[in-house]
Amino acid sequence: MKALASCCVHCGAPSTSAFCCTGCEAAASLLSAVASGAGSARARDTSVRQAVVLAVPTISCGACAAAIERALMPLASELDALQVEVAKRQVRLRVSESNLPLVMQTLANAGHPATPIGAAAKDERSAERSEWLRLGVAWFALMQGMMFTEALYWGQGEMELPVRDGFRWLAFLITSISIAYAGSPFLRGAMGELGARRIGMDFLISISVLLAYGVSVLETFRGGDVVYYDAALMFVAFLLTARTIEARATRSARRRIEALSAPLPETVMRWRQTEWIATPLAAIRIGDELHLDAGAVVPVDGLLVMAAEVDESSLTGEAHAIFQPAGARIYAGSRAVTALRVRVSEVVERSTRAQLARIAAEALADRPPWLAAGERYAGVFTVTMLGLAIASFALLSLSGSDRGLPTALAVLAASCPCAFALALPAALAAAQSSLAGAGMLLKRGSALAALADVHLLCSDKTGTLTAARSTLRDVQLVADVPRERVLAIAAALERDVTHPLAEAFAPYDQHIERHDHSVALGAGPSALIDGQRWSLQAHRERVALFRGEQPVAQFVIDDPERPGVRSLLQGCADRGIEVALLSGDAPSRVAEFAAGLGLRNAHGGLKPQDKLAWLRAQSVSTVMLGDGLNDAPVLAAATVSVAMGQGAGDAHRAADVVLLGSDVTKLLFLFDLARRLKRIVHQNYAWALGYHALMLPLALSGAMPPWAAAIGMAASSLIVTLNALRLRSPGQSNSILFDHPPLSTVR
Amino acid sequence: MNSLLFLLPISALLVVVALRAFWWAVHNEQFENLDTAAKSVLDDE
């Protein structure tokens, strides 16, 4: 789309570039995409209204929805079908091409900048639509089918044969449609399971449905006594309903983990030589310079070109704008509070946001080992039940009873281990989504289960219980080097070092060149500067600067206690969790710090191997809190490890759980969630066991009709799913069947 | 039994109309957003 840039290509307003505003630019790109998708060359009529989906990342609660509706009120005659979706952070409406920029401008003026979104969202939408249609067809078919089969029951013996057969053929027609369309997810799932040579839920469900259907078709052809079309229809309708609710629940949990998931814009403004050019996100490369409007979601990782305010709350769960200086690193998924310019350092697919989603997915796949054993038992159980069903059918048929088929169907339905299979995964997914909302990243799923039984919290001191930002309190010069120079050299040595103490020197960095820089484990950094070897060494509670072997200066560093540490300790005491402090700092300093907090169990002067030995000597299961950078082996020795991050970029830290943010009291939420998870998983297993123990004897005895077993099966898996969903609410249970942000965020 | 001759077509017609209405509702996004309206009553404004 090349233009002699004197007026806007889209709206014709005077403009120095191809488009006068991002609104026009987005509208043009959206519509050219639509046109090329349609593959038609006909002239576009810009006054025809069409459906548009806008991503509006700033929507956070119902009040925002009301504000948006009010803001668009003056344009009411230009648009229709306006929907503000809080959970998806989207606005949908029908508007003409020529009015779309006006709508986007109005939204931006109201503080809700919007971006049109395309293909990916549409796919998900059409998948959700077929889900609804399947559900509708299943229930309509059930109602119609029941009309005929009920008539057949009541009219037994009195109905004329042609009428009876006519009714049966109608029921056959309806059932065929229901199974082929509404039941297709089960049939496809069963084929998949057969391909993988295992017997699972879908296989059992399909067998039950097809058995009831097949026998009925046979009886219809030979004019036999009874047909079971109603059983097949009920299986499909009830189980599809349970599955749909379950799918909605997992989808909403996934959405929360992904965003974390403000949808990304399709194009961004990129600087090329002399002007800003709208560029598709996929074409952005490392090193590009991008311009983002206030309110936009940052699509890539990068470095700020100019100072700006950034909101990382979607990643860290801590809602406040952070002022970032030029050169600061910002992360994909955060939001620009002021307009910002950023140099790309990681492209979209490799950005922090993508990593978070990947790590979250991997954590879900990680199951506790006892669960794998449980799944094997479930397989054996299923095969046994299949055998029992066949045996009861054979026995009853041989003995001349007509109860054979209904009994076998009931046994099949009652034996489906749906509730068992869902008990833990549903709870784990819900817990993970809850963690994501609080700004915690679960990297190993089984760690959460183990966390419920932890009674000893071991913590590092520097960077965990003390604030991440340490400051320089005093400098004592011991040689003839001036203070300025001493600080500049120390800062050069600590540049790019990840230890929290290094931050104290960052303000004094004058970018002196250094060579041969190295950091020995357990010692300070050293480097060649102007031909001399300089090093920093921790000396008691001080840090000393050496030139060769000669001390040059001593620094006293303030390492203040992190806000929230006291409530963490109090919270641990309330929960019966002991706290131990393991630090590599000088014992006197550790003792002083521990005394200030009222901590009795404190050990200073420990080298990493001492910490390891100390942890291994514990008989109870432990959780180790560290920074996940220099202490990875120590963290790995604890039952569960937790790393304190400082911001969104810390997802890579080596630990089972990473706190993305500086609030240490999140740990208490983690403990509570782990305990609730354990309780809910136990409840789910107890329910599933009790259900089977009650239903199987009833089904085997023939006292339960197949439809009742189908209701029981659907209800039991629903109960398990809903119970698991309670983990998504911050405290006590509330209704969370459908996705919405927790009520606590609604102000 | 002759009443069946019209009752059946009528019921079939009703099913077609109902399914068509449902299809329309799904495709006109009636089921896309089930919570915004439900929560709007919780708003102070």
Image: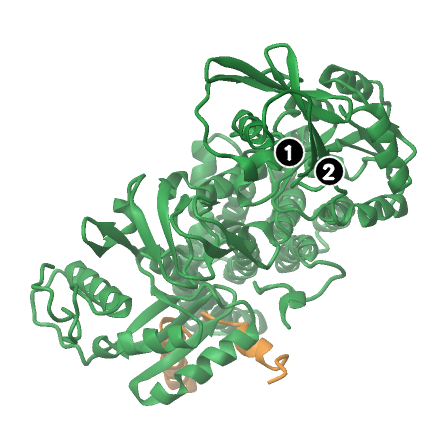
Name the residue: 41% across, 81% down. B11
**Residue A642 image point, x, y percent:** 69, 35
* Residue behind mark 1: A500
Left or right of A159, for residue A1: left
Viewport quadrant of the C terminus of chain A: bottom right
Hue used for the chain lettered B = orange
**Tag 2 and tag 1, C-beta contact below 8 Å:** yes
Which of the numbered marks, if any, corresponds to residue A524? none
Q: Quadrant of residue B35?
A: bottom right
* Residue behind mark 2: A559
Label 2 and label 1: CA atoms lie apart by: 9 Å
Give the residue type that dot 2 points to.
Asp
Q: Secondary structure at mark 2?
A: loop
Name the residue: 61% across, 82% down. B41
Hue used for the chain lettered A = green
Query: Residue A237 versus residue A512: which sits nearer the camera?
Result: A512
Sort mark 1 into few (<14), some (14-19) or many (20+) by Cα contacts within 10 Å.
Answer: some
Q: Is residue A345 above or below residue A268?
A: above
